[in-house]
Amino acid sequence: MSAQPVEPHPHGPIATYDQLRILADDVIDAADRRGNRVRADIANQKITIHMMSPSNPHGRIVTALAVQVESQDSRAVTLAENRVHHPGIGLCRTADLLVMTEQAYERQDDDFAVFAPDVSVAVEVVSPSDPGNDYVTKLRDHPRIGVPLYAIVDPRDGTVTVHSGPDSASGEPRYRDTPSRYKFGDTVRLGKWSIDTSAFPRYRA
């Protein structure tokens, strides 16, 4: 998955977050008409376009996660390929999977994206073509927007890393320096949900 930033004109007025989100939707709609699937994220007055090319293992893991969470908790809501944002800081990312309570979902009043502090868990399944987006960009931005728990599932090496505990002791919200690490086959704890990873597929070499 590759990314290309789309920036406001350097000599024009500063775009508002509302203007950028309208433009982001326009870009996605234009790509759909051409038969392309893209994500459009917003950060630092920029829209970044990610070409999407999901693989079979990627899709299978996302589906398995959603099924396991909802089978354990009838009041849990899972959202695949959904945007998560914090308008107050002008930041929006797209997650492979979001988990939230039914109560939190019902209080959403914006169809564009889910309000990040209402999310219980965000999960990313690492893409072989752009692992830095999950391990660097989203690891930095998810605590900034208020996501309390962030899991990175990596089918390249069969690992799961769970980051938690955003705090601002360093001056900006970030996760704890020591995350919880698992390998495929382990039972992974995501908040109040337990995930059996024994059937998670690896990417083929």
Image (tube, grey):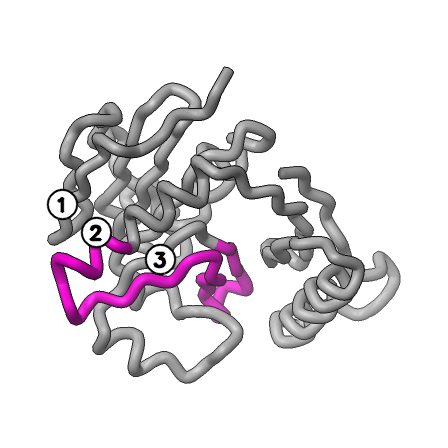
Circle 1 packing at 10 Å, graded few (<14), some (14-19), many (20+), is some
Amino acid type of the residue tagged 1 in the rendering: Ser
Callout 2–callout 1 Cβ contact below 8 Å: yes
Amino acid type of the residue tagged 3 in the rendering: Leu
Which of the two residues, 30 or 71, is positioned nearer the viewer here? 71
Which residue is rendered at x = 35% and y = 35% of the image? 153
Image position of 93 with respect to 188: above or below: below
Label number found at residue 104: none
Image position of 195 with respect to 192: above or below: above
Label number found at residue 68: 2
Which residue does the numbered mark 1 point to in the structure image? 194
Which residue does the numbered mark 3 point to in the structure image? 98
Distance from Cα at disc 2 to Cα at disc 1 = 8 Å
Residue 202 locus on image (x, y percent): 39, 25
**For marks 2 and 1 on the same chain, the one whose residue lies earlier in the sequence:** 2
Residue 34 visible in the shown view: yes
Image position of 66 with respect to 12: above or below: above
**For marks 3 and 1 on the same chain, the one whose residue lies earlier in the sequence:** 3
Q: Could you say which quadrant of the image residue 74 lies in?
A: bottom left
Q: Nearer the viewer, mark 2 or mark 1?
A: 2
Which residue is rendered at x = 45% and y = 48% of the image? 141
